[in-house]
């Protein structure tokens, strides 16, 4: 299978997950392209339709994906509308599958404040006719130099998330990726 592994990571948390995804996909014998999105990523850098299986992940920023990703998603969406690849009623495409995920700290309302992110990321793929098989959530330490935010990593709804994602999280990613590739 040809696998695409797209991620955006401000402080490196999502990057840890994405690099583990890359490692596991390769170990399972598949071909993988990993693309780290930045504010300069052009819409033509990414062609989802070249791939059989897509992973997409970002951090959560005030309940949403980072603005750079929203801007890029809008541009890619327009590209596929113009090319005719996003069709009205979004017919399904055979053998096109995706998983979306986020890393999040959930200091106030826990997973609830992260839920929109994998949903948003997946809509572009759903519009293209991919089956978004599932959405994953991984705890990610809130990285901010201001000590006010330290409490977000110890007293929030997710409990103590210092150092997350950690080795155990990456083992979980390895196991989940190995499983999902068989779907
Ligand atoms: C400015 C800022 C805003 C954030 N907003 C949220 C939020 O609304 N909800 C949440 O669960 N986590 C929030 N986080 C935590 C990040 O989503 C979390 O640390 C994530 O793992 C960062 O991933 P990245 O380093 O790959 O970008 C925020 C972090 C920062 C620095």
Image (cartoon, rainbow, N blue to C red):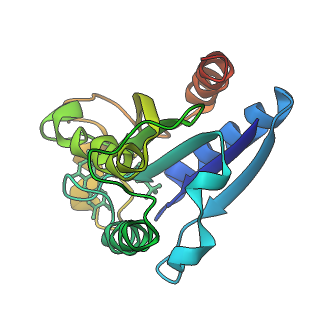
Q: Is residue 95 placed above or below 176 in the rendered structure?
A: below
Q: Looking at the rendering, which quadrant does residue 181 occupy?
A: top right
- Nearer to the camera, 9 or 152: 9
Name the residue rendered at 20%, 52% in the picture: 63
Q: Is residue 136 placed above or below 46 in the rendered structure?
A: above
Image location of residue 102, percent across then percent down: 40, 43
Name the residue rendered at 59%, 27% in the picture: 173
Image label count: 0
Left or right: residue 10 compared with residue 17: left
Give the residue furthest to the bottom.
40
Name the residue rendered at 62%, 30% in the picture: 170
Q: Is residue 23 placed above or below 144 in the rendered structure?
A: above
Image location of residue 44, percent across then percent down: 57, 76
Give the residue furthest to the left.
109
- Nearer to the camera, 176 or 94: 94
Q: Looking at the rendering, which quadrant does residue 140 occupy?
A: top left
Image location of residue 79, percent across then percent down: 43, 73
Name the residue rendered at 42%, 33% in the picture: 132
Quarter in which the N terminus is drawn = top right
Task: Name the quadrant where ligand 1 sits.
Answer: bottom left
Left or right: residue 25 compared with residue 59: right
Image location of residue 101, percent across then percent down: 43, 39
Quarter in which the C terminus is drawn = top right
Left or right: residue 22 compared with residue 121: right
Q: Looking at the rendering, which quadrant does residue 118 occupy?
A: top left
């Amino acid at each position: 299978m040809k696998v695409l592994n797209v991620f955006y990571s401000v402080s490196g948390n999502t990057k840890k997950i994405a690099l583990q995804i890359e490692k596991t996909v390769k170990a399972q014998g598949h071909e993988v392209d990993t693309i780290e999105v930045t504010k300069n990523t052009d819409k033509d850098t990414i062609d989802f339709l070249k791939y059989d299986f897509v992973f997409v992940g970002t951090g959560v920023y005030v309940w949403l994906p980072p603005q750079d990703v929203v801007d890029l998603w809008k541009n890619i969406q327009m590209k596929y509308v113009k090319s005719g690849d996003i069709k009205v009623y979004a017919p399904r495409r055979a053998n096109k599958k995706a998983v979306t995920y986020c890393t999040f700290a959930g200091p106030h309302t826990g997973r609830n404040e992260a839920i929109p992110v994998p949903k948003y990321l997946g809509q572009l793929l759903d519009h293209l006719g991919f089956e978004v098989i599932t959405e994953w959530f991984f705890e990610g330490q809130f990285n901010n130099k201001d000590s006010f935010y330290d409490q977000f990593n110890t007293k929030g709804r997710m409990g103590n998330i210092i150092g997350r994602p950690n080795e155990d999280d990456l083992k979980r990613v390895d196991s989940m990726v190995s499983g999902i590739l068989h779907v």
